[in-house]
Image (cartoon, helix red, strand yellow):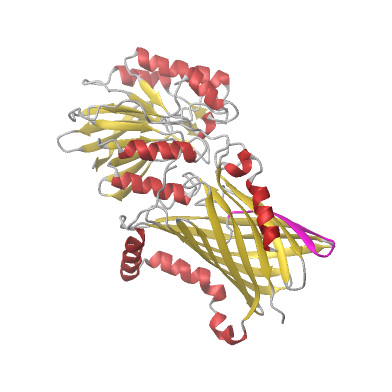
Amino acid sequence: MLNYTDSTMQTGMLWHVTRRLRCGYRLPAFLLLCMLSPVLGYPGFASSLSIQDITLQIGRHDSIVKEHAPSVAAVVNLESSPYSLAIGYRNRMPVHDISLYGHRTIAPNFGIVTYVHTAFGTADSILTDFVIGYEQGFMLKNLSLSYALGLQASTSFFPFLERPLFNASPYLAASIGYTCFNRCKVTLFTTTNTLFEYACQSISPILGSTCTVSISNEFEIGATYSMQLSDVSPEAVLITSKEVGVYGTYKPKK
Amino acid sequence: MLCLLATCLLLFSSCSDNLLSRIEFNHPGGSFDQAIDTTEARESFSFLVFSDLHFGRTEKGVYWAFDQFFEWLEGYPTPPLAFGLHLGDGTAYSLESEYRLYGEFLDSLEARGLATYAVPGNHDVRDNGRALFRAYIDDLTTRRFSYKGLSFYLLDTGNASLGKVQLDNLMSSVADDPNPKIFCGHVPLYGGPDMFYFSLKDPHERALLVKTMVQNKVGLYLGGHLHINHKLYSYTDTNHEFVCESFHGRDSLIENTLPVWYVFTYDAPSNRITIFRYALKRDGAIGESVVTSLALP
């Protein structure tokens, strides 16, 4: 199996980041500012930010670039009403993903969502994507439904290219969840962007499911499976990446 | 809890091969192990490039200009075109009747002395399209060949992705080939920031291909798929991407296009490729224009 890592990657990456920061990409910087705007209020709430939960996940990630990569992820959820913030890190060697997810509640079951995600470790590149959109949820007894619409943009930086590659497309997401026995929840979702995955185009959907079981007020365990498709019907579709994992969540007592 | 987590992971890992163990599922595969000449001296030559024939396309306003094209081809000045490249979507719905017409068209080009290579497009690989491609067009959906010092890699991008097997084979074959190279696929690699829905979608796959182009003397990536206009994007001074217009024309509000084909002329002394565009105008005349001249590595 081919390995696309580069031994000089880390040195090259530092040089590349420094160079990019020095040169400045006005458009990506502007986009980053726009995307982060919903969470820019966080410093003001820093003192009241509280940890809602900490999730650790282990699993396996397969993609076109690398099969059978063990993946380890950690996500910390913070909250300061009306804001919530998730900070995530995933390691699926040789790729590292760092993510930030922000949510601002505008009204009950309605909010603004923002993702910022960076992946590095593939072909000397820094792959960054941004999402801004709104999300609305509904509750029908034990059934929860939600959808999100917005804009997603991505930039691919390479140390050997003068200009990054830039794409933009609609952000689309929908999920349906069912809670049973007051402690088990199954969720099915389709989206164009998750905390750690995205595509350059929104017609490359990510399909997935999660199953979570509460074992006490402080602990939850669960399993997740997701896959990304190369296209949609009627085209012939390939699975370009998939991930299976199990996770445990700790919710500190308040 | 840790035991439970470990048990769940083991259960997941031992499930279906298709869904969990392998990334490839219904993959295109493909190899690039055909023999090529890496010692041949570079010489100047020209070749024909066209894309999106779409035999069987039934939408309103679609038309072809076969008679005018054949007349142009038969009158093409010497030296003759070395070969032709069709960049995919020879059919509309991957039907056998469409593949039959597609194959007959390529045969008619060969009868006029123009052997033509073809790659599968997204419209060619629906259902059992690849099997029909092998039956009527070429028994290989991916291949490479060399001509007068340049190597041509024909990619199967019909799934909007190369897939793991093809990508691995491409990476290793390209690394061992010292010739300047041209990648020929249907779905564009990138094409520019305004190519919203018409290029490869996996950013990691794209990153690998871009790096491969820059580091392994791939001067040009040729794609189609877009129909409505051509696109030129230069990654570096010597690494470029060109996206072709469609060979068929269409009179409609959303797709108002002329039948277009191209001649690529490689000039060995300057190591540049000049792209000539030919379009059948509404008045029946064939217009020629120079699109650009590109330096190769």
Q: Closest to the observer: B218 or A179?
A: A179
Specify the segment rendered in magenta.
Answer: A177-192
Q: Closest to the observer: B193 or B132?
A: B132
> Does the segment drawn in magenta span residue A96?
no
In the visual, does B293 lie left or right of A153? left
> Does the segment drawn in magenta span residue A189?
yes
Name the residue rendered at 80%, 64% in the picture.
Answer: A183
Tell me which corner region of the image, top left, top right, bottom left or bottom right, holds residue A240: top right
Tell me if residue A185 comes above or below residue A66 in the rendering: below
Q: Residue furthest front?
A: B3
Place of residue B41 in the rendered image (x, y in percent of width and height, measured from the top left):
17, 29
Position of the N terminus of chain A by quadrant: top left
Visible residue check, residue B263: yes
Q: How many marks?
A: 0
Visible residue check, residue B244: no
Place of residue B64 in the rendered image (x, y in percent of width and height, measured from the top left):
46, 25
Tell me if residue B89 comes above or below residue A1 in the rendering: above
Name the residue rendered at 32%, 36% in the picture.
Answer: B182
Place of residue B277 in the rendered image (x, y in percent of width and height, measured from the top left):
32, 34
Place of residue A130 in the rendered image (x, y in percent of width and height, measured from the top left):
51, 63
Tell me which corner region of the image, top left, top right, bottom left or bottom right, holds residue B148: top left
Q: Main secondary structure of the magenta part?
A: strand
Position of the C terminus of chain A by quadrant: bottom right
Q: Closest to the observer: B152 or B208?
A: B208
Q: Residue furthest top?
A: B111
In the visual, does B151 lie left or right of B226? left
Q: Residue furthest left?
A: B269
